[in-house]
Image: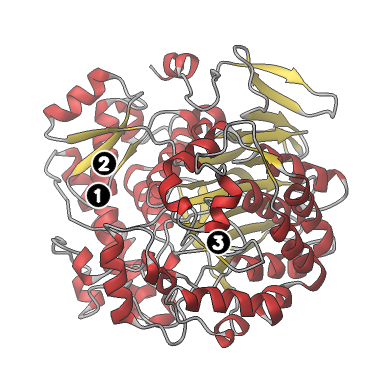
């Protein structure tokens, strides 16, 4: 079933199929290109030295150039992140935030960096609640400045450069400057995103001038976009580092723009922002050591819970069901529903209350997860809740270099085009990340849970409050067998990140799928209610079987979500093959050499 799907899956945006043959480029990259309707860029690649996978052809190429020039994985990741901010403006950029997981090969160190946006110190919660409720009907409105969090991406990238990079920051920034100055081509996916948001883009002149024709129509595929103001800002960032964004003229323009739209960010909020080096969420399961993001991420919670319940190898009961069978999907959706409920009870900003870390660990208790698994296998589990959230799009990238260093990094401005606010004369598109807080009214019918004993009266750890980082599903992940990396992954798409990345990782660990199959296979998404979204490529008989189990299936094309993945395979220690894959849903690119 899986092989049939891989060979025959049409892609709306790429006009290609993912039946792969090996091709060689003059640069020495080993690529897995399509044998039919070859795309202009590869979705999968193999090499023995280094690899990059991102959602943008330009970002992947720029990162490879930095590696070839002597930069390490951190330098190349910074380049890729900034290039994504230029070429994928609806998803990420300097006005957003990020999580990063870094593996330093020389000493085996794992670094987990939280550069998530945070609410201003004088954040008006009641005002936010009013604006947030109105935004359900009017996504772009006058008070949207209240949804802008203090950006974290520039501080996070500068911190990585200073502590773990090899090249000067300006060298890592240079390719993004060049892209913004010389322009990039509107690909099919970006055209689709612009078309989707055309009405709201018309309301913001700074965005309309970039992405729309004078008539107000979306730029056509193949059009060229130059972001000259952003190029100037990027150049200053490369020269002055974090001070260029968080102090001085650019900081003043960010604050002025937020205030003009009803927000309350101050210069002190910007100047005092710091990324946080956190402990990774770590578990050893069946000989696999998994490192992923802990709180304030909820994505890592779902991944670890699913692996603890169902295992991380071919002895898993999921293996006997068959990859992407109806039994497999049923077990997944019930397990994931449990994680959705746990998220509501235990995940919040760990710096806002010590109970979060305690409750997070309790949610991973093996005994309670075994009991949950038993209910699922006995068809007695019907966990469901109504749990609203407004998480949106993101960008993910993975880089590994010749020394074996690895960076898995997810960056976001939240909704498509964030808050639709552009800081005057800077080209910085500001996030609307504070919409990721959970209002009490969002928890309409949350089931009872044993975790109440841990959280006590704190029934909404992700409630809006000043100086807090809202919960995210972003989950950069690296997995080891012994002391050798075997998998790195991450994804995009708001709350679809957790379900998408988890399914891709299960595809490898349990079924042994290759990277391109893991990221491109059809998926399900479990929202905060009793329904399940199923991708249209899931066979009809599988969907019918799920319906017979009482599952309410909603068909959806998951075009706004993607997974990036690297795999390592070893013959003898030191002799390895790296496979890189980018999800076809958003038209990414993978390169290796």
Observer able to see residue 296: no
Q: Residue at x 75, y 26 (%)?
A: 30
Q: Nearer the viewer, mark 3 or mark 1?
A: 3
Tell which of 78 and 546 is nearer to you. 78
* Residue identifier under label 2: 333
| The C terminus: image quadrant | top right
Pointers 2 and 3 in contact (CB under 8 A)?
no
Q: Nearer the viewer, residue 337 or 331?
A: 337
Mark 1, residue position? 337
- Which residue corresponds to mark 3? 99
Image side of residue 464 versus residue 559, left or right: left
**Element on which disc 1 rests:** helix
Q: Secondary structure at mark 2?
A: helix
Q: Are circles 2 and 1 on residues that touch, CB within 8 Å?
A: yes
> Is residue 516 among what the camera can see?
yes
Q: Residue at x 40, y 81 (%)?
A: 352
Q: Report, in whole angstroms, how far the alpha carbon at label 3 lies from the one at label 1.
A: 24 Å
**C-alpha distance separating marks 2 and 1:** 6 Å
């Amino acid at each position: 079933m899986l092989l049939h799907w891989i060979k025959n899956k049409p892609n709306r945006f790429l006009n290609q199929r993912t039946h792969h043959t090996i091709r060689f480029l003059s640069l020495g990259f080993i690529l897995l290109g399509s044998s039919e309707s070859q795309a202009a860029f590869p979705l999968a690649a193999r090499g023995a030295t280094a690899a990059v996978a991102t959602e943008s052809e330009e970002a992947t190429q720029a990162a490879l150039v930095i590696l070839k020039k002597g930069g390490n994985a951190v330098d190349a990741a910074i380049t890729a992140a900034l290039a994504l901010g230029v070429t994928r403006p609806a998803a990420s950029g300097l006005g957003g935030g990020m999580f990063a997981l870094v593996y330093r090969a020389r000493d085996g160190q794992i670094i987990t960096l939280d550069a998530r946006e945070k609410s201003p110190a004088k954040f008006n919660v009641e005002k936010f609640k009013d604006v947030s409720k109105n935004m359900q009907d009017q996504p772009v409105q006058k008070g949207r400045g209240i949804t802008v969090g203090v950006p974290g991406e520039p501080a996070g990238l500068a911190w990585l450069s200073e502590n773990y990079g090899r090249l000067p920051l300006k060298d890592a920034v240079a390719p993004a400057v060049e892209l913004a100055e010389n322009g990039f081509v509107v690909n099919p996916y970006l055209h689709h995103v612009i078309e989707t948001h055309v009405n709201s883009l018309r309301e913001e002149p700074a965005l309309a001038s970039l992405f729309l024709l004078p008539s107000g129509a979306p730029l056509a595929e193949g059009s060229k976009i130059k972001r000259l103001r952003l190029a100037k800002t990027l150049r200053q960032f490369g020269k002055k580092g974090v001070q260029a964004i968080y102090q001085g003229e650019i900081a003043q323009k960010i604050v002025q723009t937020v205030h003009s739209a009803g927000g309350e960010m101050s210069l002190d909020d910007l100047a005092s922002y710091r990324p946080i080096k956190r402990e990774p969420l770590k578990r050893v399961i069946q000989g696999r050591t998994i490192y992923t993001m802990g709180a304030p991420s909820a994505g890592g919670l779902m991944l670890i819970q699913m692996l603890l319940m169902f295992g991380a190898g071919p002895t898993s009961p999921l293996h006997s069901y068959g990859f992407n069978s109806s039994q497999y999907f049923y077990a997944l959706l019930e397990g994931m529903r449990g994680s959705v409920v746990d998220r509501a009870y235990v995940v919040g900003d760990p710096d806002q209350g010590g109970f979060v870390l305690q409750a997070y660990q309790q949610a991973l208790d093996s005994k309670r997860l075994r009991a949950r698994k038993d209910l699922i296998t006995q068809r007695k589990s019907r966990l469901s809740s109504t749990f609203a959230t407004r998480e949106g799009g993101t960008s993910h990238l993975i880089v590994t270099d010749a020394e074996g260093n690895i960076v898995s990094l997810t960056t976001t401005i939240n909704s498509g085009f964030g808050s639709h606010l552009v800081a005057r004369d800077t080209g910085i598109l500001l996030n609307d990340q504070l919409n990721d807080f959970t209002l009490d009214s969002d928890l309409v019918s949350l089931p009872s849970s044993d975790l109440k004993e841990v959280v006590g009266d704190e029934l909404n750890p992700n409630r809006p409050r000043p100086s807090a980082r809202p919960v995210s599903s972003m989950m950069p992940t690296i997995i080891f067998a012994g002391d050798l990396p075997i998998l790195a992954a991450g994804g995009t798409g708001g709350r679809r990140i957790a379900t998408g990345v988890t399914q891709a990782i299960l595809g490898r660990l349990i079924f042994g799928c290759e990277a391109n199959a893991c990221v491109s296979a059809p998926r399900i998404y479990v929202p905060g209610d009793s329904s399940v979204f199923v991708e249209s490529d899931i066979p009809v008989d599988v969907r019918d079987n799920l319906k017979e189990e009482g599952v309410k299936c909603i068909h959806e094309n998951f075009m706004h979500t993607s997974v990036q993945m690297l795999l390592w395979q070893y013959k003898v220690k030191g002799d390895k093959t790296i496979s890189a894959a980018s999800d076809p849903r958003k038209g990414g690119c993978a390169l290796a050499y």
